[in-house]
Image (cartoon, helix red, strand yellow):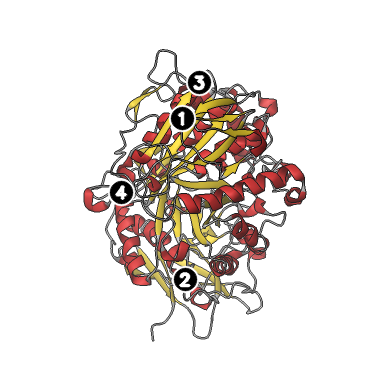
Amino acid sequence: MTTPEIRVWAPYPQRVDIEWSPVPDSTNRSREAHPPVADSTNRSREAHSPVADSTNRSREAHPPVADVTYWSNGRRREAMEAAGDGWWRWPLPEGVAAVDYAFVLDGEEPALPDPRSAWQPRTVHGPSRTVDTGAFAWSDDGWRGPRGGAGSLGGVFYELHVGTFTPEGTFEAATARLDHLVELGVDVVEVMPVAAFPTDRGWGYDGVALYAVQDSYGGPAAFAAFVDACHARGLGVCLDVVHNHLGASGNYLARYGPYFTQAHETPWGPAVNLDHDGCGVVRRFLLENALRWLRDFHVDALRLDAVHELKDDSPRHYLAELSDEVAALAHELGRTLDLVAESDLNDTMMVTPTTSGGRGMTAQWDDDLHHALHVALTGETQGYYADFAGAPDGPQQGPLAVLAKVLTRGFLHDGTHSSFRGRDWGAPVDREGLDARRLLGYLQTHDQVGNRATGERISALVADPALQAAGAALYLLAPTTPMLFMGEEWAASTPWQFFTSFAEDWLADAVREGRRAEFGSHGWSAEEVPDPQDPATRDRSVLPWSELGEPAHARMLRWYTDLVALRRRLVGTGATRLADVEVEADEAARWLLLRHRPTGGRQYAVLVTLGEDGASVPLAGAGIPWLAWDAAAVAVTDEAVTHRRRGVSVHPDGHP
């Protein structure tokens, strides 16, 4: 029997000591003990040259881990054994099930947490705690993936943030609301990042302990229980992971080895090292992290944050390697596993199989669809929305023409000029060959709502709820894969604002000033931008579940529930094509007609009228609407459908 051990890759220091203390059973509330680094982590050990300290721009500021208040049961220090190629090892003492521990590099205090820490119960600056993921209690033995094993592609996604989904902000509290998602018709719950981040308030994109589960959410066992509860209800789980950068507070990786490289720059500083000296171990660090969520926590899919910032000039791109390893794991586990990329490249190379030279992602986010819907519904044209308003002398002469292009061709910028970027952008989409489900469409996301100055939802930006209803129908009944943002389904009145709780004054000030400067360029005044550090900013962003019983909110919830149910009937579970979508629009009369006409499939038409007085639209052969926002205002003849006021209706399409 192999003795359990703790391993760490630390090629920079000449000596590594471990400070540790046993964890009493009553303290180890996560039923866990740190998993040894998987064998595959060692496959790419290689020599490397240290890079300058300046590669770590995180300006580490931290309370000392050596402070006795961090330790539950005293602590001891022992030398770790050099295991070669920059690795160090320390066997757990016999009879000790779990330990708190931290590393001392070359005798320098403070001791630092483990880069592969499975749990940070006392902040990301404190000691790590070992975790035995094999001790989790699972009841999902028969689970084969979302939608009975068909996978997440084409299913209805629902993005949520654990910390604001409920007032408590925990996995346990979120579990109590899962039946709401089942009743709505959700297939996949997309959970925003849970990797450990500083303190207890934040979006999660400044995580620094990529293997650990945020303690304020409940820790590792609570996350496993949440996933198990989702599976028990037929819900898949997609976890948002951030591999393109680490946060500034508690980021100690550059003290250990060449985790970053100055050869590439990102918005956060030097890039994660995927293609320079020492990159083999860094790549495995990230690959094993991804595989661990899927294997040990039974997650069904990963959403990969801003993959365009994964700078990799290797012959085999990191994403392609990840795709192939996830496919192998899916085969081993006997269930579907998916990868969803957030990419602003507008290039379907991202979802092209690795065997054809692509990155192999299952699907990718399509911000162009959001932007086109947003401009058509709200009329906003600032910043990156400008191109989506169209131009009198351009190929799309108004926002509805832009929306028509995106609905039929996937992107607005498919090799065309982007005024926001100041260059041509994107690549054409193969409308015949691309499975349209590989594009994720949405009306709202955490980014598109939260990266407004005051975090207004679409329901706060439009004067008439019929406009939100129209936007929802277009993306939920398009052949792409739809995603809702939490609270959208009942037009929640609360905003979703950017919030943090950094302990370091310099970092808190930098975030405040950065937000004010960013929004100043979009026309907002500094006074409008909420203070991210104020606890009230988080509190304002918590979903108001009490609204579900109010008539206006209940009506919107029924609309979304009916749309999702209708999608199941009309779109089905098989592959779809953009070539089967036809769109007509009239800018002056403010109407748009989407027709989905797959060969051998259900043919239907979605009519939206955005003008206050509605419109009469030629549509021969349309039947009585299956669904309408305001059925009393819809009239159907043999030749046309009339909306007597602003609205949306869905019809069988009998036109040849």
Residue pointed to by mark 2: 143
Say which residue appears at 46% left-offset and 32% top-offset: 620
In the rendered image, residue 127, in percent from the top left (x then y), is placed at: 57, 64
Cα gap from disc 2 to disc 1, whole angstroms: 38 Å
Say which residue appears at 27% left-offset and 43% top-offset: 313
Cα gap from disc 1 to disc 3, whole angstroms: 11 Å
In the rendered image, residue 559, in percent from the top left (x then y), is placed at: 63, 45
Residue pointed to by mark 4: 359
Residue pointed to by mark 1: 403
Name the front one of labels 2 and 4. 2
| Residue nearest the viewer, comparing 350 with 613 | 613
Name the amino acid type tagged 1.
Answer: Leu
Name the front one of labels 1 and 3. 3
Marked residue nearer the N-terminal end (4 or 3): 4
Q: Residues within 10 Å of mark 4 (few under 14, many from 20)?
A: many
Residue 568 visible:
yes
Say which residue appears at 30% left-offset and 52% top-offset: 320
State the residue lying farthest toward the top: 393
Name the amino acid type tagged 4.
Answer: Arg
Residue pointed to by mark 3: 587
SS under mark 1: helix
